[in-house]
Structures are given as C-alpha cells and as structure tokens.
Amino acid sequence: MIPMLVMIILHSGSGVEIDLNTDAITNLRNPEPANKAFSPNVKCQVNMSDGKFVTVKETCEQVRRLMEQRK
C-alpha cells in the first residue's frame, strides 16, 4: 500500500497560507497569554516532527477538526 500525503491549509499570523502534512504534526499548543513572543493574531502553535514549529491564526481546536476531517 502506498502512503498518501495528507495536507491541511492553515494561515500564518500575517495571513499567508501554509500547507502542512498532518503526519508531521506532533502536537498542538495554545500560546500563553503572557507570552509576548507571538503576534496577537496567533491562536495555535503547531509542533512538527522535525523539531520546528509553526504559529497559525486558527485555534488548536480548528486545527484538530481539520486533521480529523482529512483522515
């Protein structure tokens, strides 16, 4: 069986579209309100299997729903 690449489209804090492979997402994290390192538009930090992370406008709940819909 050939593995299928499953992508979701999210948006950076500035609104740029980001295509992410759902198999590479390791976990989701809500930014802490006191942490001023992220722009106010960022609602979720998406951690990736390569150790990097992406911050997006979508909430972590919205990201989870998109991932579930793509399964």
Image (tube, rainbow, N blue to C red):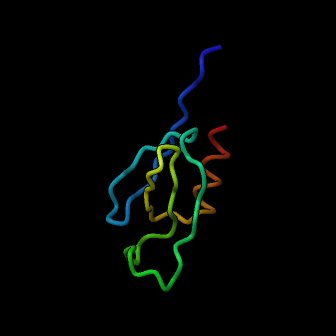
Frontmost residue, 36 versus 50: 50
Q: Residue furthest front?
A: 51
Q: Quadrant of residue 56?
A: bottom left
Give the position of the N terminus as an image quadrant. top right
Residue 58 in the image, given as x and y percentages of width and height: 50, 63
Q: Residue furthest top?
A: 1
Figure disc tally: 0
Q: Residue at x 50, y 62 (%)?
A: 45
Q: Is residue 37 left or right of residue 3?
A: left
41 vs 20: above or below: below
Residue 43 in the image, given as x and y percentages of width and height: 50, 70
Frontmost residue, 9 versus 50: 50
Q: Residue at x 53, y 29 (%)?
A: 5
Q: Residue furthest bottom?
A: 34
Give the position of the C terminus as an image quadrant. top right
Q: Residue at x 53, y 78 (%)?
A: 32
Frontmost residue, 61 versus 23: 23
Q: Residue at x 53, y 44 (%)?
A: 49
Residue 44 in the image, given as x and y percentages of width and height: 52, 65
Q: Is residue 1 left or right of residue 17?
A: right
3 vs 26: above or below: above
